[in-house]
Image (tube, helix red, strand yellow):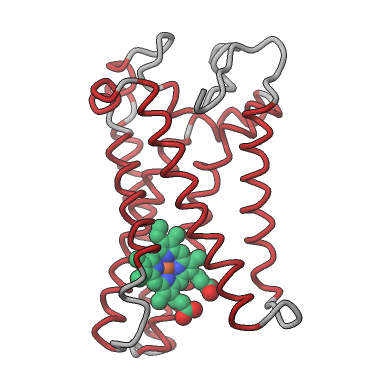
Amino acid sequence: MSGTNVTAHPSQRIGSPDRPVGAHSIAAPPAVSYWMAAAFVVSSALAAIVLAVAGAGGAGTALALRVTARWCFLLFLPAYAGGALARLCGPRFAVLARQGRAFGLAFAAALTVHVGLVLWLMTVAADQRAPMLLFWAGVACTYALALLSLPRLRGWLGPRVWRIACEGAMQYIALVFAVDFIVEPLRAHGADEYPLTYLPFVVMLVGGALLRLAAQIWRRPGTAARAWAE
Ligand code: HEM
């Protein structure tokens, strides 16, 4: 991997001048498909285990939603912050940056199970969060990002609009996670009783957001990396 593009966001490099569109689409799809299939299978297995143990009623399904959401988050985080980490900390983390697109598409595949559980919850517990537009918009952003990873669509939108759309969708999904990991537990339990089990996820999410911010403000000297949404 060349020193000039290690620190650029991986999806930014798709179709960039130093990596022609066709090159990515020839090499990547099989590997990315495996990632997506594996993420979906793990998500389904987690959901099945929780439903088998805790029951397929409202409580069991809510638990399965919480478990699959955490698995989704572990896939989303490297897609969200991997490029920034590589840009700030150098080639040690280049593998995360290189696989950013695969992590993003794996996240979209895993989220499908979460959405399936939501639909199931709506049938077994009609009073649940079905009308929450904020969350459905997060789902729309996820699948929009999956579409945006198609080189042809990037070419059609142009690099500037494409970058802004990717940044907006990524940040919106991060916001949905922040609502679930920070706002909702605070609302339900208050600051004094905030469940500590959420803390690792909050640290990872806030850390990822700060890394992205830092990577946009500070560019490593000696690299040709461009800020994500410049
Ligand atoms: C990008 C889209 C989404 C993300 C990132 C996301 C994220 C999350 C997270 C992090 C949790 C765990 C919350 C906790 O542990 O307290 C969760 C649970 C849940 N989500 Fe989603 N979600 C998304 C889409 C949706 C949609 C569209 C709905 C339905 C409107 C939904 C309904 C739920 C429900 C009912 C729970 C269980 C809450 C509970 O009882 O504790 N989610 N989601």
- Residue 52 visible in this rendered orientation of the protein: yes
Q: Residue at coordinates 62% horizontally, 45% vertically from top-left?
A: 209
Residue 180 at x, y = what percent? 53, 68
The quarter of the rendering in which ligand 1 is drawn is: bottom left
On screen, residue 163 versus residue 181, left or right, reads left
On screen, residue 143 versus residue 65, left or right, reads left
Residue occupying the far right of the picture: 192
Question: Quarter-wise, where is residue 54 in the image?
Answer: bottom left
Residue 61 at x, y = what percent? 38, 82
Please name whichever residue, 227 or 91, is drawn nearer the observer in this view of the structure. Answer: 227
Q: Residue at coordinates 31% horizontally, 17% vertically from top-left?
A: 21
Asked if 23 appears above or below 216 in the picture, the reply is above
Residue 9 at x, y = what percent? 51, 28
Q: Residue at coordinates 34% horizontally, 57% vertically from top-left?
A: 139
Please name whichever residue, 96 or 178, is drawn nearer the observer in this view of the structure. Answer: 178
Residue 91 at x, y = what percent? 65, 23
- Residue 44 visible in this rendered orientation of the protein: no
On screen, residue 104 versus residue 175, left or right, reads left
Asked if 171 appears above or below 136 in the picture, the reply is above
Count numbered badges in the picture.
Answer: 0
Q: Residue at coordinates 52% horizontally, 60% vertically from top-left?
A: 177
Asked if 212 appears above or below 208 in the picture, the reply is above
